[in-house]
Image (cartoon, helix red, strand yellow):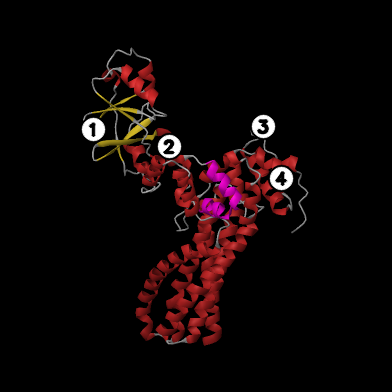
Amino acid sequence: MTDPVETKVDEIKVDEKSVDENKVGENLENLVSLILHSEVAEEYQDSVKSLTIFQQVQLIESLPAEERLSVWHCIDPASWWALIGYLQEESSRNLVRSLPQEDRVELQKLAVSNDVLALADILPKSMLDAIVLDQDEKAALEFQQALTYSDEQVGRFARRNILRVRKGISIASVIDRLKRKDFISAVFMVDSDRTLLGYIPIASIFNNNENDLVDTLARPIQSVEHDAYISDIMTTCQFEESMDYLPVVENGKLQAAISISVILQEVRLSYTNNTVGEAPAPDEDLFGSISVAMRGRGLWLCINLATAFLASWVIGFFEGAIQQVVALAVLMPVVASMGGIAGSQTLAVTVRGLALKHVTGANIRLLYRKEMKIAMLNGLLIGALIALVVSYWFDSMSLGLIILCAIVVNSFAAAATGTYIPFILEKMNIDPAVASAVVLTTVTDVIGFAIFLGLGTIIFL
């Protein structure tokens, strides 16, 4: 462990009312640096507690796995579920799985239905089963039914504690039924076969003459299908100011209701967690498992390999009239393409991290080391595959070894460029999302061609 930095805890506390966004970013960067260089949590505990929930999320996303637990224990347990919900999916999954048993038990005690349903896909099965067992039989059955839907569908968050009333009954009868229920989310009017007729605001029930018929309070309302996607509801449904819940139907029959606030929350989280850039590196935890990151990116590298060999195959039509050295030109697109796609994946992770303030001067070296390890593993695996194909295609083991070396070196160059170029451009007040790709392509092309053609010249000429 290195010596603690000289930054004082009091100097990095965030006062939201007196500092602007840039100052908050600087304070969080200082706090990240302090945490990485501290041996005891007491040095930064008060500063972590003083942050808002969103700043705590940003802080955790900016730290390696080892330090995340220390920060987690500085945060009020009452905020734990909210914190997990705001983290990126892979970060949430890694954090929960790393929690000691006593923290998991505490999380189970604090569990709220909507939080658990929203995060069910990232919770360990043992923990999810324990939460279900803590509920009564009816609640557990409804909970398990909700889990049959994905976290993007209405059915996952639909509440079944609704009151169905028929036409022609008095408001007094409805009030009496409401008093006999523990909790009712919404009241709807249905006919004899549960077909939806309208929505009845609960407030209006208590603000009108009890002798009037409930029919006078019913309002038309748009229903949603139980298996509809929440993102689609935002574009297809009309929301009114007094509307708290939307009716959920299955085969035209009223089954449940979904809260408007839940819909808005899920859409907001989905928007926040959108990845930056077109390269396939989806929702990767900044300092998560190297093997998980390698598998995710390696798949797309293999897909890209097919298109790279297509370009080489077209050029190869001319190879019959050329000497073996020209085979280097035939394979140049493979070297350039593999370096470019590997670099764009690192670029996507870094640019997203910069946009979300997860990547700072305090942790850029940690990210660099992780990316270089992934570059080495993917470079060796993909490079070896290409070398085998090339050796067979051109009947030359030397040519296969040359392209293997070029792919590995270019992978390192792509990782270093994809990590540091966006960071440097942002420091220069240049938009990294726009300019980084140009620099990346230039570096990977120049280094890839120089290594590949240089080694070819040395060996074959």
Local crowd at mark 2 within 10 Å, few (<14), some, or many (≥20)?
Answer: some
How far across and how far down the image is residue 153, in percent?
36, 44
Q: Amino acid at mark 3?
A: Ser
**Residue 428 showing in the rendered view:** no
Q: Depth check: give the residue in front, 33 or 460.
A: 33
Q: Depth-wise, is mark 4 or mark 1 nearer the camera?
A: 1
Where is residue 197 shown, x and y percent of the image? 25, 28
Q: Nearer the viewer, residue 59 or 261?
A: 261
Q: Secondary structure at mark 2?
A: helix
- Mark 3 lies on a secondary structure that is loop
Q: Which mark is residue 44?
A: 4
Looking at the rendering, in which quadrant would you find the N terminus? Answer: bottom right
Position of 36 with respect to 138 (left or right) is right
Amino acid tagged 2: Val
Please tell me which residue is depicted at 67% across the width and 49% down the height of the picture: 32
- The residue range painted magenta reads 90-110
Q: In this figure, which residue is indicated by the disc labeled 3?
A: 18
| Residue positioned 64% across, 46% down in the render | 73
Disc 4 on helix, strand or loop? loop
Q: Which mark is residue 195?
A: 1
Q: CA distance from mark 1 to mark 2?
A: 24 Å
Quarter location, residue 141: top left
Up-down relation of residue 235 to residue 183 (above or below) = below
SS assignment for the magenta stretch, majority = helix
